[in-house]
Image (cartoon, grey):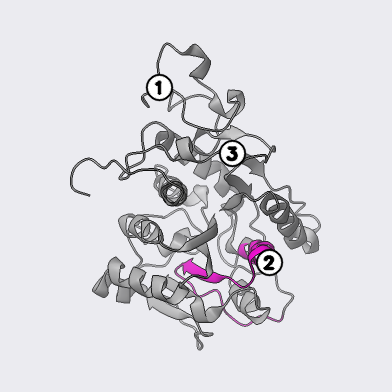
Amino acid sequence: MNGQDDNADHRRGDQAFRDADGRGSWTEMTYGGALSFARRRYSRDLDGVDIVISGIPYDNAVTYRSGCRLGPRAIRAGSVQLAELKHFPFGFDPFETLSTIDYGDCFIDPHHPTGVFDSIESHAAGILESGALLLSLGGDHSVAYPLLKAHAAKYGPLALVQFDAHCDTWPDDGTRFDHGTMFARAAAEGLIDVGKSTQVGLRTYNDSDHGFEILTSPWVHRNGIDAAMEIVRTRAGGAPVYLSFDIDGLDPAFAPGTGTPVAGGLASWQGLEFIRGLEPLNLIGMDLVEVAPAYDHAEITAIAAASMAFDWCAVIAKKRGAVPRPVGRV
């Protein structure tokens, strides 16, 4: 249970449909009820909203196994237990501080593929115009390109913090719909400031670093997540920081449900510590991509993905005044 008054019948069950203001958490059956991310209210009313969560169900740009178009649905299902208790380790409910809604999914017409990126960019721009932060659930990693375009239009050149097994900066002719080239294009177009950007967890080869600081997975294993975070924070400075979190940055032992798994990655605990370590930075947006539930086992990938996204919300809540109340040594 989540500490709500069990006698308050009007705050029990199906919060996704019945909630009026998007704040707090209701008593829900973890195994039943209307699904949304962490039981947030489904709404397209952006008035007074702090964080918008929205799915981008697109995977036509994959280069190996398809199926991450079903990622947003799986991540929502993987988030049910996160809405049950106060956040660990902070000891607060982030949604008491942040008005947060599930906006549903960006509508994409896969039969007109040349319009897909425009649809995603327009979708994101409309949300950002309200002043809310956007947390996007992919979908393949190509969706980060139109999301970066929308965010850069609002904030200027971004410090990209990329958690990934792959560099995603392979050669691009400026026209490809490809989940492995979009950051080279974003850098070439000035959407991201590579001098302030860091790639974490990489374990595939590219002939050029394109100006990014690259902290490979073996380097993080040897030197630790704290050392990695110090480099990320110093490099980003006060720039607006966009986090692009590819679930294949985690080792397949912790995230088998993805299209391009690579052995030797980071553990789920390292991913969570990584996100919590971003707290001092000027966080302006996040995407969580490449969850392909057909290859998952016992929802471990979906649960890991939901936990990463939920932690980002908790970090934003702390930055906006939520007071941690940890129990035990954390």
What residue do we see at 45% from left, 50% from top? 305
In the rendered image, which residue does mark 1 sit on? 4
What residue do we see at 77% from left, 61% from top? 118
Quick one: label 3 or label 2, which is nearer the N terminus? Answer: 3
In the rendered image, which residue does mark 2 sit on? 149
Examine the rendered structure and indicate whether residue 196 appears above or below residue 38.
below
Question: Which one is nearer the viewer's eye here, 44 or 21?
Answer: 21
Instruction: Report the mark closest to the observer, 1 or 2.
Output: 1
The reply to whether residue 67 is in sight is: no
**In the picture, residue 231 is in which quadrant?**
bottom left
Helix, strand or loop at label 1? It is loop
Residue type pointed to by label 3? Ile
The reply to whether residue 140 is in sight is: yes
Helix, strand or loop at label 2? It is helix
What span is in magenta?
144-173
Quick one: label 1 or label 2, which is nearer the N terminus? Answer: 1
Determine the residue located farthest toward the front in the rendered image: 321
Residue 217: percent from left, percent from top:
35, 72
Q: Is residue 164 magenta?
A: yes
Question: Which one is nearer the viewer's eye here, 20 or 256?
Answer: 20
In the rendered image, which residue does mark 3 sit on? 101
Determine the residue located farthest toward the left in the rendered image: 329
Q: Horizontally, is 133 left or right of 271 in the view?
A: right
**Numbered-mark total:** 3
Find residue 260 and name its label. none
C-alpha span from label 1 to label 3: 20 Å
